[in-house]
Amino acid sequence: MIVRTFEVGSDQNNTYLLACEKTRIGAIVDPYLEVPGILQAARDEKIRIEYVLLTHTHRDHCLGVPEVVMATGATVYVHEKEAERVPGEGKLLTLKQGSRVQVGEIILEVFHTPGHTPGGVTYYQPDSAGAITGDVLFVGYCGRADLPGSDPRALWRSLQALAKLPDHTVIYPGHNYGKTPGSTVGYEKSFNPYYQCRTEEEFVQLRLYGKVE
């Protein structure tokens, strides 16, 4: 599996170019800004963009969808709870827990990981041990849970679900907020402060108020 990371915008958003090395069929994950440059990078590597994969529909993760669709005719995948929030027109397919997305010969497993948003998803590729986590799990951090549609308890459960992935699974987060661009599940379980919470209540206190009482 080919994975290329493009950090765009002042909030250090990560847009990913993902492709099957054999077929050169690809997808853009969470397009936001600098879409022409990302499309040119795909052409340079002879990758044909057929899909857009959204981890969630906050503006800074989907603003570039219409531009990608117009240029490539790509099909957009998004969780069913956020389908109405996808900008632009084009073919749209909805996801839920247990869905699978095929990009060339790559099969991505879909985990419904709400909490930051109601329809947040993680795309997991077991063969290459990679997980695109959007704004649920960052390096050394996790997503906000104080926004409209957020739910800190759902976010706790989503983080616990991701903790069940193999420790060597590489994390591809939605923003470059950490000391390093990427990480692993095992590292986060050991060092991420939000994984050190012993209970859901401790997590809610830390995530919403910055401390555990």
Image (cartoon, helix red, strand yellow):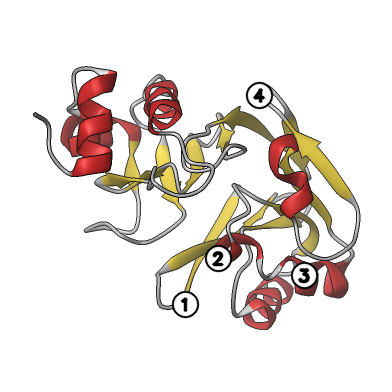
Residues at marks 4 and 3, CA–CA distance in whole angstroms: 26 Å
Name which of mark 2 and mark 3 comes first in the sequence. 2
In percent of width and height, residue 82 lies at 70, 44
Q: In this view of the protein, can residue 87 be seen by the observer?
A: yes
Between 18 and 149, which is closer to the camera in this rendering? 149
Residues at marks 1 and 3, CA–CA distance in whole angstroms: 17 Å
Q: Quadrant of residue 33?
A: bottom right
Q: Residue at x 12, y 38 (%)?
A: 211
Q: Quadrant of residue 47?
A: bottom right
Residues at marks 2 and 3, CA–CA distance in whole angstroms: 15 Å
In percent of width and height, residue 187 lies at 24, 36
Amino acid at dot 4: Gln
Q: In this view of the protein, can residue 187 be seen by the observer?
A: no
Find the residue positioned furthest to the left. 213
Q: Is residue 1 above or below residue 110?
A: below
Q: Which residue is mark 1?
A: 9
Which quadrant is home to the C terminus? top left
Name which of mark 1 and mark 3 comes first in the sequence. 1
Q: Secondary structure at mark 4?
A: loop
In percent of width and height, residue 55 lies at 59, 47
Q: Which mark is residue 97?
A: 4
Q: Secondary structure at mark 3?
A: helix
Amino acid at dot 3: Val
Q: Secondary structure at mark 1?
A: loop
For marks 2 and 3, give the one nearer the viewer. 2
Q: Which mark is residue 68?
A: 3
Name which of mark 1 and mark 4 comes first in the sequence. 1
Name which of mark 2 and mark 1 comes first in the sequence. 1
